[in-house]
Image (cartoon, rainbow, N blue to C red):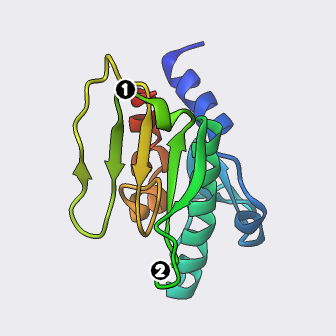
Amino acid sequence: MAAGQEAAALKDKLYRPTTRLQKLDLTIFNGQITQRSDGTAFKFTGDDNYAQVAQAMQEVVHLSMEKLGLEKSLIGQSAQSPGSTVFVSSGIEHAATVCVLIQGLGAVRFVACSWHILRIVVHLCVHRPGLWARSVAINDNLSKGDMNIDIQNCL
């Protein structure tokens, strides 16, 4: 299998359309969100529709991170705060080395780590766990807008 075919097969395995995405008449082909009816790329039709697609795409990204072996968790929850969703690899409590990927509003921040001795990934994000660029993931390709490549490098 050629490298391009392997990448496409990995994308199709990692990104699976959810019921929410299908209700919007969308699916995923080769990592791209497409129209189920004719296979064309997602087309912007308005802010409300875009927000619905963004929520559905976020669900797809979360499921893909779980397929990579990360576990969804909630931190910082209290009576005053609803907390933040994070994804961690198992064994975080005993890890000697940690990589933290933090995506917040505005500039992307990356905490450097040694790839050779890395044993764990901790990904923290208050608003959109798993994404560097939501619009890129929706309008271009999930693998260009999400953090899965970085997560795979860390694992």
Q: Secondary structure at mark 1?
A: loop
- Going by the numbered disc 2, the residue's amino acid type is Ser
Residue 52, numbered circle: none
Residue visible at 65% across and 50% down in the picture:
63
Q: Who's the residue at 60% across and 12% down the image? A: 1
The residue furthest top is 1
Which callout, 2 or 1, points at the residue further toward the start of the chain?
2
Q: Which residue is mark 1?
A: 96
Q: Is residue 39 left or right of residue 134?
A: right
Residue 140 in percent (x, y) is at: 44, 54
Q: Tell which of 135 and 92 is nearer to you.
A: 92
Task: Report helix, strand or loop for mark 2.
Answer: loop
Is residue 149 placed above or below 1 in the rendered structure?
below
Left or right? Give the position of 125 relative to 4. Answer: left
Residue at the (42%, 25%) spot, across then down: 119
Pointer 2 residue: 81
| Percent of width and height locating residue 85 | 52, 62
Q: Is 50 left, or right, of 95 in this rendering?
A: right
Answer left or right for 61 relative to 149. right
